[in-house]
Image (spheres, helix red, strand yellow):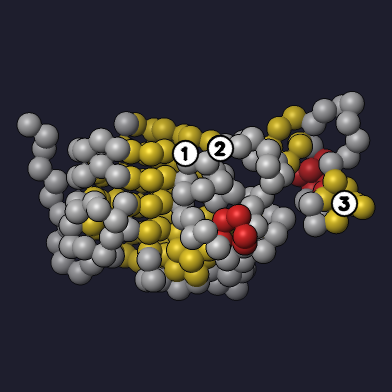
């Protein structure tokens, strides 16, 4: 794959026949009072545009150059195939979820299945902007802690809203909880040379 952007809508055009969108935090006031973008667009609220997973890879030896997956309501990317490789990944977690429906279920921006033995990801990031509700995510990336699964230049980033993300990869990396600590980065997940995935024959 090359240059893929998989997107669950975070906004839509305003319907001129409807009144101002109500704020999910307080239905007595319009959302645009808290989020100025709400004066220009309808902003996705919990339950809108149901889409659970953006990318689910089951095949082996899949390589993607440039992958963006945004705003899905469960694990945004799930990788089950062996010997997968991703070079550049960008993910924004959904704006409209809460602790019960997302954080407590341990969803992540990028998950490598526990059975996978070989995987490589370079230049990959997960961002948070929990616009409407408190939502604390355990980790931006979840993957097996095995020598054949390698991450290089992996990070999490707080953009705005409620905090946040506790770790970058599994239990590695610092929390990103606000503007005072907006980014956490791991140069590499495992010390030593990265894996070389054999070409498919």
Left or right, residue 84 beside residue 163: left
- For the question of whether residue 122 can be seen, the reply is no
Look at the numbered discs 3 and 2 and tell me whether their residues touch, using CB distance below 8 Å.
no
Please state, as top left, top right, bottom left or bottom right, where the N terminus lies in the image: top left
Nearer-the-camera pick, 24 or 123: 24
Q: Residue 8, how many percent across, how many down?
A: 57, 37
Dot 1 falls on a residue whose secondary structure is loop
Q: Residue 156, how many percent across, how many down?
A: 47, 61
- For the question of whether residue 9 can be seen, the reply is yes
The residues bearing labels 3 and 2 have C-alpha atoms spaced at a distance of: 25 Å
Vertically, is 134 above or below 11?
below
At horizontal 41% and vertical 51% (from top left) the residue drawn is: 110
At horizontal 61% and vertical 66% (from top left) the residue drawn is: 163
The residues bearing labels 1 and 3 have C-alpha atoms spaced at a distance of: 30 Å
Nearer-the-camera pick, 143 or 90: 143
Please state, as top left, top right, bottom left or bottom right, where the C terminus lies in the image: top left
Q: Residue 59, how many percent across, how many down?
A: 25, 35
Dot 3 falls on a residue whose secondary structure is strand
The label on residue 27 is 3
Task: Find disc 2 in the rendering and name its residue.
Answer: 51
Task: Find disc 1 in the rendering and name its residue.
Answer: 54
Sequence-earlier tag: 3 or 2: 3
> Residue 85 falls in which quadrant of the image?
top left
Sequence-earlier tag: 1 or 3: 3
Mark 3 crowd level (few <14, some 14–19, many ≥20, 10 Å Cα): few
At horizontal 19% and vertical 54% (from top left) the residue drawn is: 117
Dot 2 falls on a residue whose secondary structure is loop
Look at the numbered discs 2 and 1 and tell me whether their residues touch, using CB distance below 8 Å.
yes
């Amino acid at each position: 794959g090359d240059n893929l952007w998989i997107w669950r809508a975070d906004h839509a055009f305003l319907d001129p026949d409807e009144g101002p969108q109500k704020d999910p935090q307080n239905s007595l006031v319009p959302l645009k009072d808290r989020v100025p973008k709400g004066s220009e667009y309808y902003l996705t609220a919990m339950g809108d545009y149901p889409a659970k997973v953006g990318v689910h890879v089951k095949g082996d030896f899949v390589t993607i150059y440039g992958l963006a997956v945004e705003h899905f309501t469960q694990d945004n990317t799930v990788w089950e195939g062996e010997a997968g490789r991703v070079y550049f990944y960008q993910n924004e977690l959904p704006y409209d979820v809460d602790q019960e429906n997302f954080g407590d279920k341990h969803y992540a921006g990028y998950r490598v299945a526990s059975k996978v033995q070989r995987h490589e990801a370079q230049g990959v990031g997960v961002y948070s902007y929990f616009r409407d509700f408190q939502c604390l995510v355990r980790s931006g990336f979840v993957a097996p802690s095995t020598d054949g699964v390698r991450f290089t230049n992996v990070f999490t980033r707080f953009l705005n809203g409620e905090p946040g993300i506790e770790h970058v990869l599994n239990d590695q990396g610092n929390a990103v909880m606000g503007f005072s600590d907006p980014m956490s980065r791991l140069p590499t997940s495992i010390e030593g040379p990265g894996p070389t995935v054999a070409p498919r024959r």
